[in-house]
Image (spheres, coloured by chain):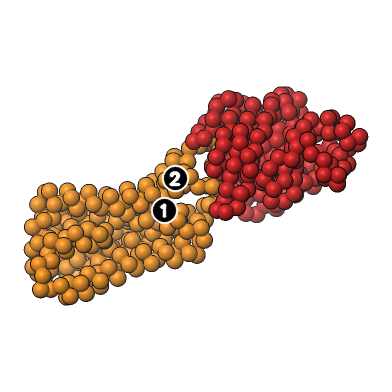
Amino acid sequence: MIDIKDLCKQFGKFQVLRHIDLSFEAGQCTAMIGPNACGKTTLIKCVLGMVIPTSGQILFKGKDIAGQFDYRHQLGYMPQKGRYPDNMSIGQVIDMMKDIRNTNAPFDEQLIYDFKLQDILHKKMRTLSGGTIQKVSAALAFMFNPDVLILDEPTAGLDPLSADILKEKILAENKNGKLVIITSHLLSELDDLVSHIVLMQDGAIRFSMPVDVLKNETKTHSLSKAITHVLKHDLVQ
Amino acid sequence: MIYTLLLAILAWSVFTLEADSNKGVLTLLNIVLLTTPLVSIIFTTIYLYNSAEFIELLLSQPAGRKKIWNGLFFGLFFSLAISFLVGAGIPIALFAAPKIAIILIVMGCLITAVFVALGFLCAILARDKARGIGISILIWLFFSLLFDGLVLFLMFQFSDYPIEKAMIGVSAMNPIDLARIFIILQLDVSAMLGYTGAIFKDFFGNTTGAMVGFLILCLWVIVPYWISLRRFVRKDL
């Protein structure tokens, strides 16, 4: 569904992404992990069209996304730190998003009810706690039934109960055939969720493989143990 | 809102205190040409910096960058233009002769557009909010005060040479001066400007000259805006 070919991004003298070759298929739930500043968020922003790559290509369902914005109808994005206009209420932000998307398809508002956002629709964004803003971001990402969900540190900042609600939702949508891409540092949280894993370091892909294969190769049962094993022994696919 | 009120107070007081409507127009002209550019450029710059996060949010949605930037421009221009029309336009229409009123109102709106465009340029060129606002204030200072000082200085230096044609070219480089010339010509006080005034009347008084001047003012809107648009379309967020 998403093909990244030889993607490079340079900010001034600093090479953030180096020759990234990666593919994502429908129905996958891929975790992108790696140390801070390894380029995960930049890569995601390139897919979203928010960062313009220096060279290389990104194909969405076979079509080049450069200069396009229509493909984003099929993307749902939950940013790491959601930023919304201060003096808009939650309800207004949701309505505005519905206006921008301008679609007649039915909305998936399950997360609004699961997170109990319907009771605080009138609250202004500037009065919300960080976790509540994350809930709004999550609800917006899933609302338009996109084929691809890109979640940047989705459970960071959520209380355990809400994190669980979100994980259930991710699992359910993934079973529906959606592609889910998650960046996270919390390997333990991802364990039951993800089917594929991509490790990035210094702007390059260190490995990209299904989780089962990784667990077999490292002879471990949990994702976090598998990753630590790889990093410790510096194994590269 | 305050801008509208300020303009309204100034305009109404000028016209009610000044019996001769022509003199009133002249005073108002100078007030308008001083405040309108200032408010337009600074308000635009501040608004764009404050909306940076909101703009980022919009960009992750299926909306084209051009459309977003254009939407912001027209939104800002119309709200500032309406403030001008309500604040200063109404008293002008009531007190000044129709021909003068029209030109004053049109020039006021054009100058608003020019400085909104310049505000867009400042906001996109400077990453830092403080620097961007500083630059916008400098631009205003340059065009409203420094430029004319420089021109006077040059006039004295080269007073022995036939510089009249050059004066026309030089005045085209300052949108505020262009607007001022248009309005003064209508007021028939161009005798005040002396020989240079006669040259201006000669050039801008007739239709071709007026069209050229008008075109240059439009260019003052289009060129800075277009540069800012090109930068925005390629900007990384």
Q: Residues at marks 2 and 1, common chain? A: yes
From the top left corner, tell me how far across and down residue B128 is, in percent.
52, 61
Compared to A110, does B200 lie above or below? below
Q: Amino acid at mark 2?
A: Trp
Q: Nearer the viewer, residue B124 or B106?
A: B124
Is label 1 in a helix, a strand or a loop? helix
The image quarter containing residue A225 is top right
**Compared with residue B77, is residue A117 higher up or lower down, i.e. above or below?**
above
Query: Taking B100 as reference, is B229 left or right?
Result: right
Which type of secondary structure does the marked residue at label 2 adopt? helix
Side of B204 where B173 appears, left or right: right
Q: Residue at x 57, y 54 (%)?
A: A13
Residue on which the image places disc 1: B120
Which quarter of the rendered picture does the N terminus of chain A lie within? Answer: top right
Sequence-earlier tag: 2 or 1: 2
Which chain wears orange? B
Identify the chain drawn in red.
A
Chain assignment, label 2: B
Q: Which mark is residue B69?
A: 2
Residue A140 seen in the current view: no
**Percent from the top left, x then y, of residue B91?**
25, 59
Q: Are marks 2 and 1 in contact (CB under 8 Å)?
A: yes
Residue B165 sits above or below residue A119 on the image = below
